[in-house]
Amino acid sequence: MQTFDTPVVDNHLHLDPDHGRGLEAVKDFARSGGTHLLVVNKPSWLLGHDVETGEDFRPVFETTIDVVREASELLDGTAWPVLGVHPGLVSKLVDDRGYDPAGARDLMCAGLDVAAEYVRAGDALALKSGRPHYDVTDAVWDASNAVLRHGLDLAADCDCALQLHTESTTDLSDVAEWADERDVPRERVVKHYAQGHLTGGTPSVMSDKDRLEEAAERGVPFLMETDFVDDPNRPGAVMGPKTVPRRVDWLLDEGHDTAVRNAHVETPALVYDIDTESTLDR
Ligand SMILES: [Zn+2]
């Protein structure tokens, strides 16, 4: 059982208690020194839900809220749900299910509306939206950006952060301008699966050494994540749940104590208004 003198936060992973490792993954994280988790709901289609209305997202969100409650009991710190609609859903709807882009947009916005209800009720910490990371038609791209902007509207209304899944880029200036227009602080726009630096938001940096080294040396706000997908069909597809604690160990060995405090105390407070130190009960 490893422990550190700091909270250790994985800012983006998934837990699938029915098909994946679920709480066993949380135990691995905790045993390695991890203390806090932001758990993002899995894409609706991976949980076998063919959504047709916003309400149809509710069981997807409830699955995450339930497993997060159990995960919190296994941690010295806390787990929080992050709820939203995966941007890849637009292609499932348009390519496989006969929606036009506007219809897909409306359904995805309705799903985000339901996610926001949980944030308002205090049952989720933040929202999740984005746009495809692969080439799409202009109509699908425009519809996706409309969904993303709706996510920003809701983040403003709920006074919460918005995690984004986007194309691979280090420049989200367009999104940052949309955030400005809605008085959403730019730092509350979090790019998941990020490189070590980002213009226009807070990078949630994938925990490989090269990216972390860059983020650590820049000295600006960043978070750390694995995007563990907890999918038995893709065992090697992503980093495992022990990765963030192991990389914290490595950063501390390298003398990056300030960066560890940045990613695990200061940036979580700045972005999510959470206190990862006072929520530790060891
Ligand atoms: Zn993810």
Image (spheres, grey):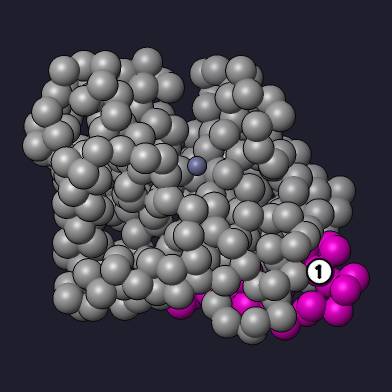
Question: Residue 79 location, x and y as percent?
Answer: 53, 50
Above/below status of 129 relative to 106? below
Image quadrant where residue 242 sits:
top right
Question: Residue 195 location, x and y as percent?
Answer: 59, 62
Badge 1: how crowded within 10 Å, few (<14), some, or many (20+)? some
Q: Which residue does the image show at 16% across and 18% down from the upper left? A: 98
Which residue is nearer to you in this view: 272 or 210?
Answer: 210
Q: Which residue does the image show at 69% across and 63% down from the upper left? A: 211
Which residue is nearer to you in this view: 148 or 160?
Answer: 148
Mark 1 Cβ and ligand 1 under 8 Å apart? no
**Along the horizontal axis of the image, is 168 left or right of 184?**
right
Of helix, strand and loop, which one carries label 1? helix
The residue tagged 1 is 251
Q: Which residue does the image show at 26% across and 16% down from the upper left? A: 96
Q: Looking at numbered disc 1 in the image, what kind of residue is underneath it?
A: Leu
Magenta stretch bounds: 248-271
- The answer to if 72 sits in the magenta stretch is no
Would residue 36 be seen by someone viewing this image from the given angle?
no
Question: How many numbered markers are drawn?
Answer: 1
Q: Which residue does the image show at 50% across and 66% down from the upper left? A: 170
